[in-house]
Image (cartoon, helix red, strand yellow):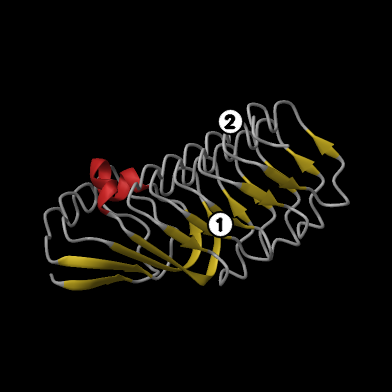
Amino acid sequence: ITGTLTLPASIKNLADNAFGSCTGITTVYLKSGTLEPDGYKAFKDCTAFKTLIIESGDLTFTSDSLVGGSSAVLETVILKEGVTSIGRKAFESCKKLRTIDMSACTRLTAIGERAFSKCTGLERLLFPASLKTLGDYAFEKCTALNDLDFSACTALESTGESVFWGCTALPSVNLIPCTALKTIGDGTFIACSNMTEVKLPAGLVAIQDIAFAFCKKIA
């Protein structure tokens, strides 16, 4: 197998090591992200696998279940319009990801717990207008993140616990476009140690415990 491997939406399970050591695969195109790998490391040792494209559905897999300890090889994730949610630990520790652009995902409403946790190379995030919730620790310790774009997030209602904990490169956050945002959760921006500016929306009702604690440069 060389180049792009396309998996139809009918596939719901991938067995352990299903495509193991297929070193010619460079791109995997999932017609549906609603995939429950049966075991771990379906693409173990697929050393050329750099790009993942997901067309639709709730993303139910984890990076570990797809590529196991080799999750660091994944460099590009392309999320299409039909994606509706990103599940728990979907891309945790994918350290070579640089940009996640969700702006085209017009049906995406939720990003789950630790979905992009410890993606230490991630620099830029663009969210869609449809997004309503950010799960606990969704982007914790994304230490290179310096561009956080909430400009389209008019539907965002709440942020979970410690969503951006330890995003030490983040210089500022502008939540003014988030007109539906009522609550900033516990520790949402805790230890964003280089953050100097925060802009809050007019309709905000509650800022929870330690939401901006240890952000020592906010003036």
Residue 21 placed where, x, y %? 11, 54
Q: Position of residue 11 (x, y in %)?
A: 35, 64
Q: Residue at horizontal 21%, vertical 66%?
A: 26
Neighbor class of circle 1 (other Cα within 10 Å; few <14, some 14-19, many 20+) is many
- Against 179, is 3 above or below? below
Q: Considering the image in quadrants, where does the N terminus appear?
A: bottom left
Determine whether, in the image, residue 94 is placed left or right of residue 42.
Answer: right
Name the element at disc 1.
strand
Categorize mark 2 by other alpha carbons within 10 Å: few (<14), some (14-19), many (20+): many
Residue at 76%, 56% in the rendered image: 178
Question: Quadrant of the image for the C terminus?
Answer: top right
Query: As rendered, which of 32 and 152 lies closer to the eye?
Result: 152
Q: Which of marks 2 and 1 precedes in the sequence? A: 1
Q: Which residue is mark 1?
A: 85
Q: Is residue 90 left or right of residue 163?
A: left
Amino acid type shown at disc 1: Ser
Residue 107: give x, y in percent of width and height.
Answer: 62, 67
Quadrant in which residue 76 is drawn: bottom left
Cα–Cα gap, marks 1 and 2: 27 Å
In this figure, which residue is indicated by the disc labeled 2? 191
Number of numbered discs: 2
- The image quarter containing residue 4 is bottom left
Amino acid of disc 2: Ala
Residue in view at x 76 percent, y 50 percent: 157
- Front of the two marks 1 and 2: 2
Q: Regarding mark 2 in the picture, which secondary structure is present there?
A: loop
